Structure formats: C-alpha cells, structure tokens
Image: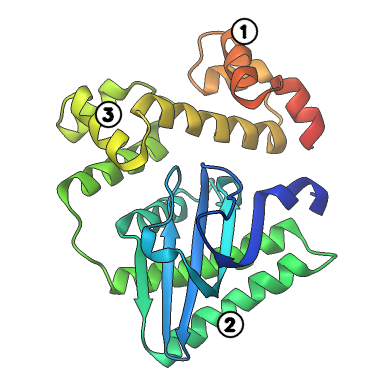
C-alpha cells in the first residue's frame, strides 16, 4: 500500500489544544506530555471520545492520532487489549526513568518510520503495535479500579469485537451483560455519545472496508458475512455511511 493511500490514517504532531483537529471522531489518540526526564504523562483518547481536559494546554508533548485500521483486526486478543488500554482511564503516569526511556525509544521508531519518504505501511503498523503493547504492559501494572458503568462499557466492546459478525442487535448484548437495552444505551450515550446500534454499525463499516481491501470475497458474500439479508441493503448502508459504493471503494483503495 502506497503512502498516499494510508497518509490520512495516521498523523503525528507537536502539542495539543482544543483546536487540534483529529483525523476523525472514530480514531484513537495518544498524547505524550513530557514533564521531566523521569516523568511522562500519557493521555488517551478512546474511539468516539475526546481527550480529557487535563490533556489540553501543554505545549511540551507529541500527539499520535490514528484510525482504527492500523489495529490488526485479525489478532483479536491484541485488538481487545488495545480497547481495554484506551478505556480504563484517561491517563497513565510513568515516573521511573527506565520506563520513560523505554517508551521514548519506541516512540522514536514510530516517528522515524512516519517521516521516512519510503515508509512502509506494514512497518508503520508493526512499530505502532510495539508502542501500544509497551503502553498496555505499563497500563496493566498501573490498573485503577473502574466504576461499574465503565466495566459494562468494556464488557459491551469486548463482546462486540468477538461476535459482531453474528450478533448485530443491542438487545443481545444487553441480555449478556444483564441489564436492559435502554440502560445499555444510556451508559453508551453517557460514555461514548453513541447508541449500541451506532457502535455496531461503525464496527461493521470498519470491517467492510478492511475486507474490501484485503480479501477476495465478492461484495455479496461480504454482505451476508456482515449480517445483511441482501446485497442491496448492504450497498445502501455502505454508500450512505462512506459516501461511495462498496465496488467503487474497493477499486479506489486497492
């Protein structure tokens, strides 16, 4: 995949304020705030959310903003670890010099590949994965107790990642979590400002794009794989959301 194709999937920039434009609402963000050689604050922006207020107004930092496409969806355990990392709490503080240096080394690998005129999409995804796995390990060591609704949010996201191809109704997930469908949507609206149906559909679009680019499935086969009852209903849904038909998207992005 050429750099022109994936250039809009990731950006790295210095500083962060309320006017900083993200790639999209449905993108991940990490802001590394440097305080000293032994103190690094890592701010997380989950999908469909903004950074917490504490992240803004610090000039001495670097922003990594990337689309969900850069998370390898075939590795479900890794994808779930990433979702957990971003949804545990808004920030992580590293206050040991060896921890700060370790994160900085991997950050530099990502920045170098990003700025390389001959950069490789596969290499960029790989070094980004190393950075995320490093943060996940520190995150797990620094785990903070979550409130009940935060745990329910992650339950929903975790189940959806595993079953969204076969289970596309919010009622199913509410039943599995043990709450009403109305209550599930209230929690999701509070945390992500989206309903369960909107989040499921967003996940379907991400998967549809990925498979249109990477797989040899026909569009009709893909429609049924994603739980649609006809090719026409999938095509209407895709075009309404993405702005172009599945066939046009496949041609333009392969």
Q: Residue at x 64, y 65 (%)?
A: 13
- For residue 185, which numbered disc appears in the image? 3
Q: Is 105 left or right of 95, judged from the image as shown?
A: right
Choose between 129 and 65: the one closer to the eye.
65
Estimate the spatial distance between the alpha carbons at disc 1 and disc 3, rounded to whole Å. Answer: 28 Å
Above or below — where is 163 with respect to 83?
A: above
Could you tell me residue 177's position as x and y percent? 19, 35
Could you tell me residue 180's position as x and y percent? 16, 25
Dot in front, 1 or 3: 3
Q: Residue at x 72, y 65 (%)?
A: 114
The residue identified by callout 1 is 232
The residue identified by callout 2 is 105
- For residue 178, which numbered disc appears in the image? none
Could you tell me residue 48's position as x and y percent? 44, 42
Q: Secondary structure at mark 2?
A: helix
Q: Residue at x 46, y 56 (%)?
A: 78
Mark 1 or mark 2: name the one nearer the start of the chain. Answer: 2
Q: Is 228 left or right of 243, judged from the image as shown?
A: left
Q: Quadrant of the C terminus?
A: top right
Above or below — where is 223 with respect to 81?
A: above
Mark 1 or mark 3: name the one nearer the start of the chain. Answer: 3
Dot in front, 2 or 3: 3
Estimate the spatial distance between the alpha carbons at disc 2 and disc 3, rounded to whole Å. Answer: 41 Å
Could you tell me residue 63's position as x and y percent? 56, 65
Q: Secondary structure at mark 3?
A: helix
Q: Is residue 26 visible?
A: yes
Dot in front, 1 or 2: 2
Mark 2 or mark 3: name the one nearer the start of the chain. Answer: 2
Circle 3 crowding by C-alpha within 10 Å: few under 14, some 14–19, many from 20: many
Q: Toward which corner of the image does residue 146 lie, by quadrant?
A: bottom left
């Amino acid at each position: 995949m050429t750099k022109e194709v994936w250039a809009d999937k990731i950006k790295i920039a210095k500083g962060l304020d309320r006017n900083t434009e993200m790639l999209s609402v449905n993108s991940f963000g990490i802001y590394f705030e440097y305080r000293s050689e032994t103190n690094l604050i890592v701010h997380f922006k989950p999908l469909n959310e903004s950074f917490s207020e504490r992240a803004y107004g610090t000039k001495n930092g670097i922003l990594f903003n990337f689309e969900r496409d850069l998370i390898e969806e075939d590795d479900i355990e890794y994808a779930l670890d990433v979702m957990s990392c971003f949804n545990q709490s808004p920030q992580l503080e590293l206050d040991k010099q060896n921890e700060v240096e370790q994160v900085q080394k991997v950050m530099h690998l990502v920045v170098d590949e990003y700025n390389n005129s001959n950069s490789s999409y596969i290499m960029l995804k790989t070094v980004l994965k190393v950075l995320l796995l490093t943060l996940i390990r520190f995150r797990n060591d620094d785990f903070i107790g979550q409130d009940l609704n935060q745990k329910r949010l992650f339950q929903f996201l975790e189940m959806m990642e595993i079953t969204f191809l076969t289970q596309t109704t919010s009622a199913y997930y509410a039943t599995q979590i043990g709450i009403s469908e109305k209550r599930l949507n209230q929690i999701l609206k509070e945390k992500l400002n989206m309903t369960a149906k909107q989040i499921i559909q967003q996940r379907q679009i991400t998967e549809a794009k990925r498979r249109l680019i990477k797989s040899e499935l026909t569009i009709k086969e893909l429609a049924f794989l994603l739980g649609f009852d006809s090719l026409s209903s999938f095509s209407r849904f895709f075009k309404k959301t993405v702005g172009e038909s599945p066939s046009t998207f496949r041609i333009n992005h392969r």
